[in-house]
Amino acid sequence: LDQLTVDDLKAVIARRPPRTGSYCMVALSRVLASMGTVAEALEVKRPVPDKKMSPALNVGVPAEWGRLSRVWFDRSTYSKRFRNKSYYFLLNVGRWLGQAHPDIVSPAGWTRDLALEAVSVVCQWHGGDWCSIDPVHIKSRGQILAPSTRAGRISILRVFFRDLQEWDLIPRRFDPMRSMTTPKSVLALLGPN
């Protein structure tokens, strides 16, 4: 062990396929650094892939809807967690739109009537509806969404359209704050937290 160097560890990592064995080498380098054999431990260097750039994620989503959803994700000042959740939901809405209204490919084509229809559809949404191909994270597949989830998703749509209109990316054809309100029937199901 006294004769091992950081270069020896890097050579072992370079011979292995990506993501296999490198963690063990990093752990071993930490042990060697604590013994004083090497000056410093190796760091885990692995790029984090951006899942939002996956082509499979946009299957069934009209191109312009996907583009403006990504623009909203990049420009919005909400927390990263909220933006991620919202982005994936917006893609689900895009899949619904592509299937139910193939002639409307952009948020710019939405009217008050379509906004009301979208709110109605979200109120009837089940876990896994309009998701990307074979999502593994769906816990409530086939079950109606909880009232708080339905209210939250309607809010996401409202914010999305409000922001796109404020940024002059789409024309103001309807008022999302009025047309995309959470129905009283859903609000009545919400209990105290």
Image (cartoon, grey):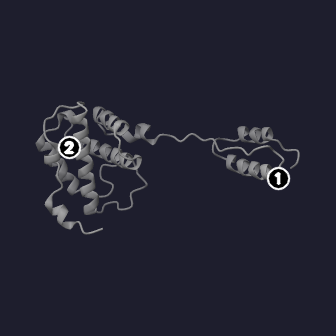
Number of numbered callouts drawn: 2
- Is 11 above or below relative to 146? above
Residue located 29% across and 58% down the image: 149
Residue 109 x/y as whole percent: 18, 34
Dot 2 crowding, Cα within 10 Å, few <14, some 14–19, many 20+: few
Is residue 140 visible in the rendered image? The answer is yes
Residue 143 x/y as whole percent: 30, 63
Residue found farthest to the bottom: 192
70 displayed left or right of 42: left
Residue that numbered label 2 is attached to: 100
Residue that numbered label 1 is attached to: 35
| Helix, strand or loop status at disc 2 | helix
Residue 161 x/y as whole percent: 23, 40
Q: Which of marks 1 and 2 is in front?
A: 1
Quadrant of the snapshot with the C terminus: bottom left
From the viewer's side, name the closer residue of 96 and 188: 188
Residue 87 x/y as whole percent: 35, 44
54 displayed left or right of 117: right
Dot 1 crowding, Cα within 10 Å, few <14, some 14–19, many 20+: few
Q: Quadrant of residue 140?
A: bottom left
Residue found farthest to the right: 3
Q: Which amino acid does label 1 sit on?
A: Met
Q: Are marks 1 and 2 in contact (CB under 8 Å)?
A: no
Q: In which quarter of the image is residue 189?
A: bottom left
Per the model, the C-alpha gap separating discs 1 and 2 is: 65 Å
Residue located 80% across and 40% down the image: 8
Q: What residue type is labelled 2?
A: Ala
- Is 123 above or below relative to 2? below
Residue found farthest to the front: 77
Residue located 78% across and 49% down the image: 33
Q: Which numbered disc, 1 or 2, marks the residue that appears first in the sequence?
A: 1
